[in-house]
Image: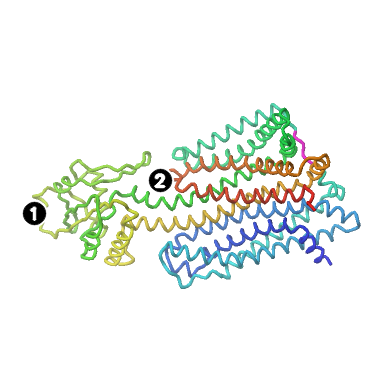
Amino acid sequence: MLLKLALSSIKTRLKDYIVLLIGLVMAISIFYMFETLALNSSFIDENSMISAVGFVFHAGSILLAIITVAYTMYATSFLFSLRQQEFGMYMTLGAKKRKISLIMFIETMFIGFCSLVIGLILGTVLASVVGNLLMKQLEFTSTTYAPFYVPSMVVTIIFFAILFLLAALFNLFRLTNVSILNLIHADSKAERIVIRKKAIVFKAILSIILLVIGYYAMIDIETTQFMGIIVALFTITFGTYLFFATFLPLIIQKMRDKQIKKSKRLNSFTYAQLSFRISQLSRVLATVAMLIALGMGAIAVGFAFQNNGVLLAEKMSPYDVVLANPTKAEQKVIRSMDFNEDFSYHFKTDSKTIYFNTQELKQNPPLTTSFSATEKSKTYRLKEAPRNESTAWNNFIQFSVPDSFIGTRQIKFVDNTAFATQNLKENTLFIGKVPDFENSLESLKKLDQLEKGRHGEDAQVMSKYASYAQYKIFANGTVFMGFFLGFAFLTMMASSLMFKILTGATQDIRRYQMLEKIGVKRKLLVQSIQKEMFLIFLFPGIIGFVHVAIGMKMFGFLLINPYYRFFIPILLFLAIYGIYYFITVWLYKSIVLKKVK
């Protein structure tokens, strides 16, 4: 009987439960995908490149778990709020709290079970697609990768089973500690705004000061360093909450006063609605703004890391090909390539020393890159004559000549005569710079493979392409994590805002019914709802965008172009935000307006 009642109530509020179900399914499927990529031991051991990014997916799982806990608690709390009056009526008719609690527990666990089953199925499909995409990006094929991975499934089931159990117990605790009278009249309660002008002005000024400090800490991260991250985290978080608690009520009140004077259609009613419950919305809007910044930031950083590989390679070394004694196969590849600049140096080695010809080096001075802890790296040409104590020339040689030639040998720069009198085997160092590094990746990869074949697969080949390829592995993992994590954050963020808005919808039914009775056209009521929801969605959207736009500056010391493809997270955010806006308007209308016969 209790199961039948629980299923009947779920069917009655199917629209609300479907929204919750979609958010949970998405979180479960992405969590399972991350765990599959991180825990699939055979797959990780099969390729060293995958093991290098395994921790990225572990980190993604942890971050997603944290936000999922908050989202689940908030969403189930919303569903409890919608049904408070219903529970109060049951108790008035003689139902015991224990029975009502059991019905609510069954509902929560049933929704959890359905979302877990659907989420695991979708997660398996997602793990298959993402795993294949990742292998394609890293250019290898796995025979051991299993999208349906039992250990990952066990971890996912245990985590979400505990989460759903906690959510059910949380609602049981709330029901136990509320009176029948409060349940029945829950829809009649509303928070009133108490504006104390001096306190509001002080908090408003403080919020601006905190935000400015946080923005400065992120923009000048090279100076503030790790402490800047901590400062920005606290100041921007508290500044955002204070901003919404102070400026938002003032803005809405000013807009309301302006519309009252104009008395144009239902605008004054719309702003009165916002003003009536703004104190309830301020905290959730601040939370949504922070989640927007996190979601968009995760995606933006992922794409920026992907692009950073080429830029970092260009910054690391001005030359794309550096080969000592190139083989015939390597020479064939070199002849097929175009170079902006290419030349060869000659050197000789004995057991203790490696000799370079000063005149030859001076005749073709190379480009080199200097790195400094206090200044940005810069590329310049070594025009001065090489000397034994010349740090720049020594650094260039040590970076260019393979370690198998240098070893513990001392580098010496000698003139033509001294170089010719050395009765030693002469070696060649080829150096070349291509017009476009990305367009030459295929040829550079061939040279890198030939070098590995020449010195052995286990040998460390210090080439520009090798550094780029190693970085690309990490970047690809970061792109995948950032995209899916950001997508999850943005979706849960929009869901949380929608839940909060709909929680107060039942309080507005009487007001909309009254307007309909006095002859206000339904079209005007719909327009009022659309405008009210638009303004509620607009405020956190703007603040969240400002946070992430300025926050990306923080990655300037890690990424050469932190705003690479910044339009992608913006478009994704607008798409998700827009979808949830229309869903919220639709659900809100279905609650507050009478159904048209």
Q: Is residue 325 left or right of residue 265?
A: left
Q: Which residue is mark 1?
A: 421
Q: What colour scheme does the image use?
A: rainbow
Relative side of 289 to 394, left or right: right
Q: Residues within 10 Å of mark 1 (few under 14, many from 20)?
A: few
Within the image, what quadrant is residue 232 found in?
Answer: top right
Sequence-earlier tag: 2 or 1: 1
- Quadrant where the image shows the N terminus: bottom right
Say which mark, if any, is on residue 560. 2
Q: Magenta region: which residues?
A: 189-193
Front residue of this view, candidates 77 and 596? 596
Compared across the picture, whether 258 is left or right of 554 comes to right
Give the residue drawn at x 62%, y 61%. 28
> Is residue 191 rendered magenta in the image?
yes
For image coordinates 43% across by 46% down, the residue present is: 558
Q: Residue at x 80, y 42 (%)?
A: 516
* Three-letter residue code for mark 1: Thr
User: What residue lies at 44% left-to-right and 51% top-to-bottom?
Assistant: 305
* Residue 452 x %, y %: 30, 65
Real-space Cα distance between discs 2 and 1? 47 Å
Q: Main secondary structure of the magenta part?
A: loop
Closer-to-camera residue (228/408): 228
